[in-house]
Amino acid sequence: MPVSPSASQVPDRFAAFRHRAYARYFFARFLSYFALQIVIVAVGWQIYDLTRDPFDLGLVGLIQFAPALLLILVTGSVADRFSRRGIILSCDLVEAVCVIALAIMTWHGLTSPLPVFVVLLVMGIARAFLGPAAQALAPNLVPAKDLPNAVAWNSSAWQTAGVVGPVVGGLLYGLGPLVPYVTGVVFLLMAATAIFLVPAQPRRVSREKQDWTSLMAGFRYIRRERVVLGAISLDMFAVLLGGAIALMPVYARDILQLGPLGLGLLRASPGVGAILMALYLASRPIQTGAGIKMFIGVGLFGLTTIIFGLSTNLPLSLLALASLGAADTISVYVRQSLIQLWTPDELLGRVSAVNMVFIGASNELGEFRAGTMAAFIGPVAAVTIGGVAALGVAGLWAWVFPELRQIQSLDRERKTLDEVSEV
C-alpha cells in the first residue's frame, strides 16, 4: 500500500502570505497594476476614437517603453543602492499625479493625442524606476524556499488585475471618460499607502563604487549566466513578435463589432487563463522538467496567437486568448523564479532593470511592432505572422540554449556577490 505524503511534504499554497510584509507588498502591487489597466483601457479607447489610426496605439506602447530602455543603467543601480520600498512609494505617487493630469485633459476635452503622449512619457519614467525596485524587493520579503510560491502569487495578482481591470475600465468608460481616471487615482493612492506600511527589510546593499563597471554589472552577470540570459531573451522575442494586445481596439471595433465592454472582455481573457494557471502553479509548483515546460508554454503562446488572429468568432477568440494567457504564465513563472533565485541580492536591482527592459520590449515595443505592421498589412496578418514567429522562437531557443532546456527544478540557494565573483 503506498504511503501518503506527510503534511510537511504537501506544498503550502499560501506560504508567501505567512509573511506579513509580503502580504502588504502583494496588495500594493495588485492595486497599482489594477489602476494601470483601468487607465490604459481608457487611454487606448480615447486615442483610437480621436484618430482612428492603429499606429497611434503602437505609439502608446513605444512611449511607455522608451524610458525603461534609456534609463536602464540608472534605474537598476538606484534599486541596488537605495530603499526599494521608498522608490516604489515615490513612483506610485508620481503615477497618481499623471492620472490626475489625464483626468484634467479629459475634462477640458481632447483635440490631439500629443498631451496624452507627454503624460504617458512621465508615467513611463516612473515605471522605469518602479519595475526593478518592485522585482528586487520581493525576494527580501520571503525566504528562498517560499520565493517560487511568491512568484506564482505575484503572477496571479498581475493577471487578476489584467482580467478585472480592463472589464472595469470598459464599464467605467461607458459611464463617462472621466470616471476611469478618478478610479485609477484612488487605487494608486491606496497602493502607495500599502507599500508605505511594508516594514524595512534587512538586505545586502551594493557598496560598489559608482563607475561604468558597476553600472554594467547586471549586463555582465546576465551574459555570463546563460540560463538567465536564455530565459529573459526567450520571453522577450516571443512576445515582441507575437504580442497582439495593442490591436485589441481594432479587433473590438472593426473585426468582432464590439463596444467598450467587448474591448474589456478581449483584454481580460488572457488574464482568465493566466489566473487559473497561476493558482494551479501556486498549489502544484513545477518540480521537474521546468525548462522543457517553459518552451512548451512559449510554443502554445504562439499557436493560440495564430488562432486568435484568424478568428472572427467571439467565443473562439476569447478561448484562444484565455489559452494564450495560461501558456504565457508558465513561461513567466519559470523565468521569474530563475532570475530571482539565481541572482545575488546585491545585483538583483540591476539584473531586474535589464529584465524590465526585456519585458518592456516584449510588451510596449511589441505593441509598436503590432500597430506598425497592422497599418501596413492589416491587423489579421500582423497578429497571425506574429504567432508564427513566436513558434519559431521557441524552437530556436531550445536549440541555442540547451542548458535552459535541461533545467529540472527551480530550487537553488541564492549566491552572494562574492561567491559569484569567485566563479
Image (cartoon, grey):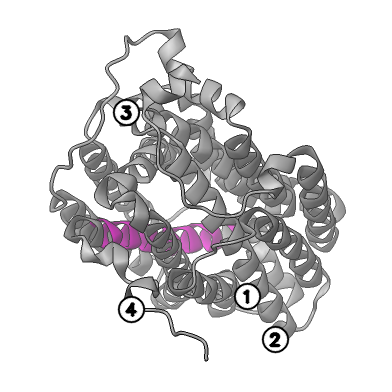
Q: In the image, what residue occupies the spot 63% across and 33% down?
A: 226
Q: Which comes before the other along the chain, label 4 or label 1?
A: 4
Q: Which comes before the other along the chain, label 3 or label 1?
A: 3
Three-letter residue code for mark 4: Ala
Tell me: residue 373, above or below residue 245: above
Q: Is 345 in the magenta?
A: no
How far across and how far down the image is residue 175, in percent?
Answer: 39, 78
Q: Residues within 10 Å of mark 3 (few under 14, many from 20)?
A: many
Residue 80 image label: 3
Pointer 4: what residue?
7
The residues tagged by marks 1 and 2 sit, at their Cα atoms, a distance apart of 11 Å
Three-letter residue code for mark 3: Asp
Residue 155 occupies which quadrant of the picture?
bottom left
Residue 227 occupies which quadrant of the picture?
top right
Left/right placement of residue 114 relative to residue 210 reads right
Tell me: residue 87, above or below residue 3: above
Q: Is 44 in the magenta?
A: yes
How far across and how far down the image is residue 291, in percent?
Answer: 65, 53
Pointer 1: what residue?
322
- As helix, strand or loop, the secondary structure at mark 1 comes to helix
Three-letter residue code for mark 2: Pro
Asked whether the viewer can see residue 13, the reply is no
The residues tagged by marks 3 and 4 sit, at their Cα atoms, a distance apart of 38 Å
3 and 1 marks in contact (CB < 8 Å):
no
- As helix, strand or loop, the secondary structure at mark 2 comes to helix
Pointer 2: what residue?
315
The residues tagged by marks 4 and 1 sit, at their Cα atoms, a distance apart of 33 Å
